[in-house]
Image (cartoon, coloured by chain):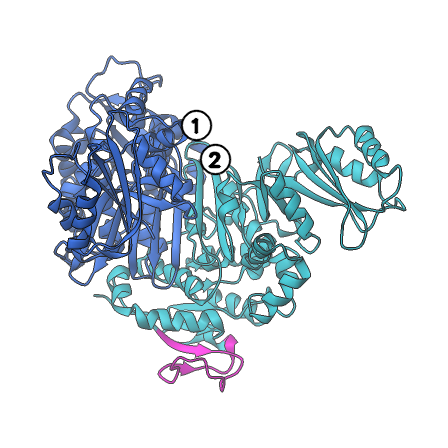
Chain colours: A blue, B cyan
C-alpha cells in the first residue's frame, strides 16, 4: 500500500465533525477502496475550545485557517468553513496556489467563484472537487459529470433544499401553515435562526447554478437564476393542489433553450404520479433527462453530518485513486457562455391563487384579466372561509406561454380587493 | 485537444447500434467532455450483410471477432456480443492480454469471469469497465464504486430486471395473469422468445452478484445467489398484496451478515410508501444503504439501446479522461471471500399463499403447521372463486426467522388438498 493521503481540515462544524468520525469509523474499508489510507493531519476552526464530541488532540491545530494551505506534508485541504467569500475563499485560493488539492462543500463559494477556482486548479494541475456542495450525500455531481456524460442533457430539475422540503411536506401531512412549521423547524434545529438562505431559495439557487454548468457545459451563472422561495405558500394552496392531484415542492429547474439558459427556483405543483411527489421530509432528489439515457433520478439525504461527510470523503477517495479531472467536466475555457433565457417564452400550465375581499364583481375582474392576457382557464375554484375572512380563488391554466400568466397578474396589480400578492406556481408536467 | 480515443466495437445488435448512433449524434459534446474525440475505427458482428440502420461502411470490418483484440491503432475494445463464455470471453481475454482497455455490457460474463478479467487488467495496467452491465443507463456501478465509496454498505437491493418489472406492473395495472402478459410482452419484443433468463431471475442474479462485490468489497459469488423468479405469481397474489398496502416486485437483495454474504433474487411485497413501489414498467432502481450516507436511490431505464449505449460511452469517457482504476473498486486480491449466509437466520415478515381444495379442515391444517413451526400470523384471508374452483389462503406473518416459514411450508409438503406449490414472498420492511 502506498503512502497515506494527508488531509488538512478547515472548519469543524457539523460536517467537519462528521468527516472526522467517518474517517475514523471506516478507516480500514476506505484504505482498501482508496488504495491507501486517508489521514487527517491538521485541523482548524474558529473556536479551539468548543467540545465537538470527537478527539482532535491527535491532529495539529492551526490557529490561522489561511495557513492551512501552506502546511508541509499536506496533500488535500478540505474547506468546510462556509460563506461565499471571506476566510473560505482566501483558503481555497491559497490552497490551489500552493499546489494542493481542494475539496469543499461550499455551494455559495462555488456559485460565485467556482470558475476562477477551477481555472486556477487547471493551471496548477491540482484536483478541485465539491460533491458535497449539491444534494449532500447523493453523488449527483459525479452522476452528471461522469455517469450521464455521454448525453446532451435536455433538462435537470429537482428538490435541492431539505429545509424547504421538510417544511412543505410537514405542512402537507399536518395541514399546518408555513410560519408555524418554520418556527417548529427552527426549534428542532432543522432550520437556521436566519432561515432566508433556505426558505427564499438562495441555497437551492447556488446548487442549481452548479448543476446547470455540469449538465449543459456552460459557465456557472448564479445571477441568472430566477429565485422565489416558499414563504408565501399557504396551507390552503397545499389543500387545493392535493384536491387537483398535486403536491407542492420547491423545485430547481434548468434547461437549455433556443434563446439561452433557463434556470429557476420556484414552488411547483408536482403530479402525485411523479417520483418527486414522493420525496418527503428533508430528502433531496435530482432528475436529469438526457437524449440517450432518458430520465435518471438520484435520491437521498441532502444534508446532515453523515451524508455530507460521505460526499466529502468520496472526493478524497477519488483523489487518493488519482481519478479526477476538470472540476466542471471540461476545461473552463471550453464551457459555453449563454445568456439567460426569457422565461416568458416557455409554455406550461400554472396554478394561480388570489386571496380577495368577499365582494361582488371580483371574480369577473379576475376572469377578465385572464381573458385579456390570453390565459385559458382549465379549472377555477372559489372558496370562502379563509382565516382572515377573505375568499380564495385558485385557478389552473391550460398550457400556454408563461408571459401571458405574468401579464394577467400584472393587470390585477393594485386592485383594491386583493389581499396580499397573488401566488403563482408552475406545474411540472 | 489530444489524439482521439480509438474504439473497436464487437457486436452490432441493439446496443451496438445505439453506441454508433450515440457517438455520431453527440460527437462534439463528447469530445468536449472527454477532452478528446472518441472514434470507432473497426466493427465486427456475426452477420455482415444485416441492415442495422446505421452507416458502417466508414469503419474497418473485421470478420473474426477474436482479431479485434490485436488491431493496431485501437485503444479500447467494446464487447457487446453477449454470453458468459464463447466469443465474448475469448475476445475479452485477448483484449486485456494485448494491453488494450475493455468495456463491456456483459453481465453474465462478469458474473462468471469478472474476477479473472479484473486480475488480468490489473496485471496489465489496462482499464476494464462495465457500467452498462447493471441497470442499463443508471450509473449505479459508479455510484457504488465511487459515489458511496466512503461507506460501509449495509445492504443493496433493487429492481434489476425490466422485463419482470414490466410484467408485474402490467399484471398489477390490468389485473391480468402472468402467462397472458408474458405472451404479450414477447409479441411486443419486450421479452425474449426464451424468457427464462429474465423471468426466472438469472439475469437479475448476474447483476446482483456484481453489485454485492462493489458494495461489500467481496469476491463475486454468483453461485451464492438464491434465485426465484416470477413465474408463479398470480393475479390473485397482486390483488391480495394491494389490499394489504403492498405491490409485488422482483427484488435483488444483498446484505453482509454475521455468518456471511446474503444474496437473493425473489418476488417481494413492497409497501406502497416505499419508492420501489412506484417503479413501474421497464424501469430499474437500486437502493444502497450506507452507514454514513443513509439510503441512496438510483432510478432510470435499465435496458434499451439508448440507456445502455449511454453507460457504455460513459465508460469510454472515463477512459479518455484517464479516470479509472480497479474494476471492483479495489485490487482483486483485496476483495474478501465470504461464505453464503444462511437465509434461515434472517428475520422478516412473509406473505404465504396456498391454493387448496375447498374441503373441511384444510385451514386447520395450515394453521397447525404455522403454529408447530413457530410462525406467528399477522393476517389471514381465505377466498373462494379461484379460476380453477380452488380456494386461496393468503397469510402475512409477523416478523420472525425465515427458517420457521420454510419449515411450515415443508410440513405441508405433499398434503393431498394442495393445488400446486405454496407461494412464498418476503416483505420489504
Count neighbours of disc 1 (C-alpha within 10 A) and say few if under 14, some if 14 to 19, many if 20 or more.
some
Residue A374, compared with residue B251, is above or below; it is below
Label drawn at residue A25: 1
Q: Please give the chain letter of the residue carrying mark 1.
A: A
Q: Residue B136, how many percent across, how many down? A: 47, 58
Q: Do the residues under discs 1 and 2 have CB atoms within 8 angstroms?
A: yes
Residue placed most toward the observer, A73 or B66: B66
Residue at x 31% of width, y 71% of height: B25
Left/right of residue A256 with respect to residue B152 in the rendered view:
left
Q: Secondary structure at mark 1?
A: helix
Q: Please give the chain letter of the residue carrying mark 2.
A: B
What secondary structure do most residues of the magenta stretch adopt? loop
Left/right of residue B267 with respect to residue A288 in the rendered view:
right
Residue A356, compared with residue B100, is above or below; it is above
Outermost bottom residue: B49
Q: Residue B201, how many percent across, how many down? A: 63, 55
Q: Residue B131, how many percent across, how many down? A: 45, 57
Residue placed most toward the observer, A71 or A46: A46
- Residue for badge 2: B152
Amino acid at each position: 500500500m502506498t503512502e497515506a493521503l494527508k488531509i488538512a481540515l478547515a472548519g469543524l462544524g457539523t460536517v467537519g465533525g462528521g468527516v472526522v468520525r467517518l474517517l475514523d469509523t471506516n478507516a480500514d474499508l476506505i484504505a482498501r477502496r482508496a488504495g491507501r489510507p486517508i489521514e487527517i493531519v491538521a485541523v482548524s476552526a474558529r473556536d479551539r475550545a468548543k467540545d465537538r464530541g470527537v478527539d482532535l488532540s491527535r491532529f495539529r491545530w492551526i490557529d490561522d485557517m489561511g495557513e492551512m494551505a501552506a502546511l508541509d506534508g499536506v496533500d488535500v485541504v478540505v474547506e468546510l468553513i462556509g460563506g461565499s467569500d471571506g476566510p473560505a475563499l482566501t483558503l481555497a485560493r491559497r490552497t490551489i496556489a500552493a499546489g494542493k488539492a481542494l475539496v469543499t462543500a461550499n455551494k455559495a463559494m462555488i456559485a460565485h467563484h467556482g470558475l476562477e477556482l477551477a481555472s486556477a486548479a487547471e493551471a496548477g494541475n491540482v484536483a478541485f472537487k465539491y460533491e458535497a456542495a449539491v444534494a449532500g450525500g447523493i453523488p449527483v455531481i459525479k452522476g452528471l459529470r461522469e455517469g450521464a456524460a455521454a448525453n446532451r442533457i435536455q433538462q435537470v430539475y429537482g428538490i435541492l433544499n431539505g429545509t424547504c422540503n421538510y417544511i412543505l411536506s410537514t405542512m402537507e401531512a399536518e395541514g399546518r401553515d408555513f410560519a408555524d412549521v418554520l418556527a417548529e423547524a427552527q426549534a428542532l434545529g432543522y432550520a437556521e435562526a436566519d432561515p432566508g438562505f433556505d426558505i427564499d431559495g438562495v441555497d437551492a439557487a447556488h446548487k442549481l447554478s452548479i448543476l446547470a454548468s455540469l449538465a449543459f457545459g456552460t459557465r456557472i451563472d448564479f445571477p441568472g437564476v430566477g429565485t422565489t422561495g416558499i414563504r408565501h405558500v399557504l396551507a390552503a394552496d397545499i389543500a387545493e393542489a392535493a384536491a387537483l392531484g398535486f403536491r407542492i415542492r420547491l423545485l430547481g429547474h434548468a434547461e437549455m433553450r433556443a434563446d439561452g439558459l433557463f434556470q429557476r427556483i420556484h414552488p411547483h405543483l408536482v403530479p402525485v404520479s411523479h417520483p418527486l411527489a414522493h420525496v418527503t421530509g428533508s430528502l433531496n432528489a435530482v432528475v436529469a433527462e438526457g437524449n440517450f439515457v432518458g430520465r435518471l433520478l438520484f435520491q437521498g439525504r441532502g444534508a446532515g453530518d453523515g451524508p455530507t461527510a460521505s460526499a466529502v470523503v468520496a472526493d478524497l477517495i477519488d483523489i487518493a485513486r488519482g481519478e479526477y479531472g476538470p472540476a466542471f467536466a471540461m476545461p473552463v475555457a471550453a464551457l459555453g457562455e449563454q445568456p439567460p433565457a426569457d422565461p416568458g417564452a416557455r409554455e406550461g400550465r400554472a396554478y394561480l391563487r388570489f386571496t380577495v375581499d368577499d365582494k361582488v364583481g371580483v371574480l369577473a375582474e379576475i376572469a377578465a384579466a385572464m381573458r385579456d392576457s390570453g390565459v385559458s382557464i382549465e379549472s377555477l375554484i372559489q372558496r370562502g372561509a379563509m382565516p382572515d375572512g377573505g375568499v380564495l380563488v385558485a385557478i389552473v391554466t391550460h398550457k400556454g406561454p408563461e408571459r401571458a400568466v405574468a401579464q394577467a397578474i400584472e393587470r390585477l396589480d393594485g386592485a383594491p380587493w386583493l389581499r396580499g400578492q397573488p401566488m403563482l406556481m408552475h406545474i411540472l408536467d
